[in-house]
Amino acid sequence: MAETFGYLDLALLEAVPRTAWRNDDHPNDGFLRITSLERLVSLLEREGALREALALSRRATRFGDLYRREDLEAKVAALDEELR
């Protein structure tokens, strides 16, 4: 269920970003924090779907740096290195 809401929230944000603006009069103030995205990335990571979690994290960074997960970048790079 958390996955469904996380993906739906991201799709809504991508389609209509102003739904999550902090201030309609000042869009440069940034976006609200969308916890369903954070939870979905964490859930995917715990399940071992690191690439999917990283892809979601990258998509979400459009809505703020708090979704950037550099630790996932490192984990995926280490995994790729092991596979070589």
Image (spheres, rainbow, N blue to C red):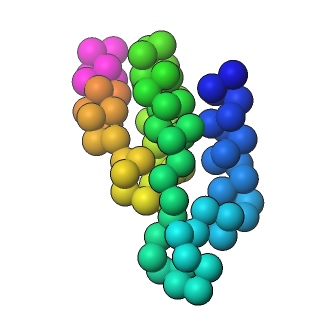
Compared with 82, 26 (above or below) is: below
Q: How many marks?
A: 0
Q: Position of residue 55 (x, y in %)?
A: 50, 39
Q: Position of residue 19 (x, y in %)?
A: 68, 64
| 78 to the left or right of 46 | left
Magenta-drawn stretch contains 66: no
Residue 54: which quarter of the image?
A: top left
| 15 to the left or right of 80 | right
| 27 to the left or right of 70 | right
| 73 to the left or right of 42 | left
Query: Of residues 58 and 32, which is closer to you in this image?
Result: 32
**Residue beneath the point at 53% across and 69% down:** 22
Q: Position of residue 11 (x, y in %)?
A: 71, 49
Q: Quadrant of the C terminus?
A: top left
**Residue beneath the point at 33% across and 23% down:** 80
**Residue beneath the point at 70% across and 29% down:** 4
Compared with 40, 29 (above or below) is: below
**Residue beneath the point at 27% across and 34% down:** 71
Q: Quadrant of the N terminus?
A: top right
Q: Which residues are magenta?
A: 77-84
* Any part of residue 30 in sight: yes
> Which secondary structure type mostly characterizes the magenta part of the structure?
helix
